[in-house]
Image (cartoon, grey):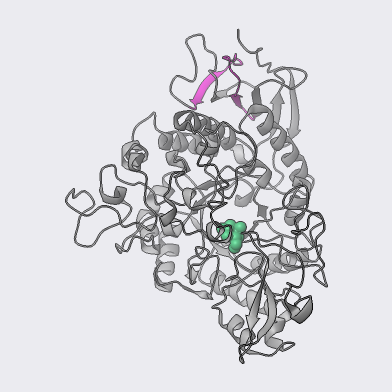
Amino acid sequence: MSQPATQLSAERLVHAPSAGDEWWRRSVIYQVYPRSFRDTTGDGMGDLPGITRELHHIASLGVDAVWLSPFCRSPQKDAGYDVSDYCDVDPMFGTLDDFDDLVAEARRHDLKIIVDLVPNHCSDAHPLFQAALAAAPGSPERELFHFRDGRGPDGNEPPNNWQSHFGGPAWTRTTDDDGAPGQWYLHLFDSSQPDFNWDSDAVRAEFERILRFWLDRGAGGFRVDVAHALIKEPGLPDWGGRPDGRSTEGFPFSDAPMFGRAAVHDVFRSWRQLVEEYDGDRILCGEANAHPVETMADWVRSDEMHQTFNFDYLGAAWGAASFRGVVERSLAAFDAVGAPTTWVLSNHDITRHSTRFGLGMTGRVNEGGKISDLVVDEDLGLRRARAASLFTLALPGGVYLYQGEELGLPDFLDLPDEFRQDPTFFRTRGERVGRDGCRVPLPWVAGAPGLGFSTLPGSSEHDDAAPTSNAWLPQPRHWDRYARDVQAGDPDSTLELYRRALAARAERGLGLGDLAWLETRPDGTTDVAAYRNGRTVVVLNSGDEPADLPAGSILLESTPGAIDADGRLVPDAAAWLDVEH
Ligand code: GLC
């Protein structure tokens, strides 16, 4: 039995072609996680020269920009999202000259470099926080952060019930010079990440200086970390819901006194004006983890950011109905404010999509909850991941790719605990394993020590006698099969599938295109999702039976054999077709 035929005649337009043609309305942006991209010094840690050296690989994918996760000076308690100097490169990654070289090389490839800006909090080693600790309660130095007296007898209780996103209370008590317990400071993340007080003009001025510093050095824009949390409700009230301060319905919430406050948008309006002073169409992309998607669209109103990550899409369970629902709601929400929707399947905070879709579970698998005990079907996950990526790459709007997804990499679920570094693991005493599994160094060369990630001193990458990897996180043994050199030139590989899809996306102008659903069944309950963007039709089959395809010539199929001998699309597969329209 096959699924009902996809009817080209019965289509329903839900998104008109983009009104503007700025690059960020259709961009493909590749996220580099510098620690894990390419190590040129042999210390086991990726670095900026490694990115510069291998930039041609990223360029050959056909992307527009590279977003670099944090590389500024940092004690690395949260992998660089704890910044101690916003205007310098951490020596582990190189120097400011290395950054300049990277920007210059990027220009040669017509790529923009997007810097990750972390404005919600800094490192406790930042000179401003150190000065605040040394200053008295009520001092201007402490005004830059959220210092409060504790509650209860002797101020022993935290000032409110807020919880750290990484587990445990969101407050840590300081110790005064005389050794007596002092005030508490707020940290929505690790205790080494004190939150800035964005009601302070001095904080705003400092970040304008930082923005200009990187724009002057040629940054193409910023990815703005935790953009939903800068402004806190005055008085820092308790958050109802549960005794631990969490809302009963999940995270995050519009009723939360630390997320999505109206005044946060003033900050980004002023930044939009600032970046527009510069030439070259520089952009702001917000990590605004807000729900529902209509709320997320607030960050990209015409005078605010250019893009925001689509967390609803990132959290969508595998399947036609699920993807279709999020796509439709997202396009409606972002169209309403005249902004492009972005599509993202993986990043450095979430289990990679080839693993998520290979687990026998649905819904959001985030932050490394206890999933290592679950059985993962790696081949099924990869097949579904390739289908999901193909479904995604023809959508109108912007796309974000996370390094390694073009290789089909899974998470390293069995990473031994002794290697774990994510503060989530430590703050929850291992209850949540954290995000290290999706941050493992890339495999470049099959059979090479460290899979060619590290250039070990005194050894060549192909020298079998060289010691094996000293990478900051170990790579699974079987990752040879995912290595870039094995995939390059193999027409059946995930890498070549991404290349072909991205080239076709550009040629066909899909990023600025329209979207019409092809009705596969009137009640919409089918396991087949099909849409048309211009002359391109995309069909995804997440059901158990082969599905009929509409008339048209096949452009791409997600895996070899995705189309059976009868011309039908097999389960867990996707295809692109060229149709007359
Ligand atoms: C963002 C980053 C995440 C980091 C957190 C705190 O969510 O993506 O990696 O841990 O902010 O900065």
Taking 213 as reference, is 299 above or below it?
A: above
Residue 145, percent across and down? 69, 77
Residue at 43% x, 69% y: name it. 100
Residue 207, percent across and down? 64, 74
Seen from the viewer's position, the closer of residues 373 and 254 is: 373
Residue at 59% x, 74% y: name it. 210
Residue 528, percent across and down? 64, 22
Q: Quadrant of the C terminus?
A: top right
Q: Which residues are magenta?
A: 533-558
Q: Quadrant of the N terminus?
A: top right
Left or right, 136 with reference to 509: right
Residue 458, percent across and down? 19, 61
Taking 417 as reference, is 315 above or below it?
A: above
Question: Can you see residue 108?
Answer: no
Seen from the viewer's position, the closer of residues 351 and 42 is: 351
| Residue found farthest to the left | 465
Residue at 34% x, 36% y: name it. 481
Left or right, 73 with reference to 25: left
Left or right, 457 with reference to 92: left
Residue at 66% x, 16% y: name it. 6
| Residue found farthest to the bottom | 178
Seen from the viewer's position, the closer of residues 180 and 60 is: 180
Question: Can you see residue 339?
Answer: yes
> How many numbered markers are drawn?
0
Image quarter of residue 216? bottom right
Ligand 1 image-quadrant field: bottom right
| Residue found farthest to the front | 153
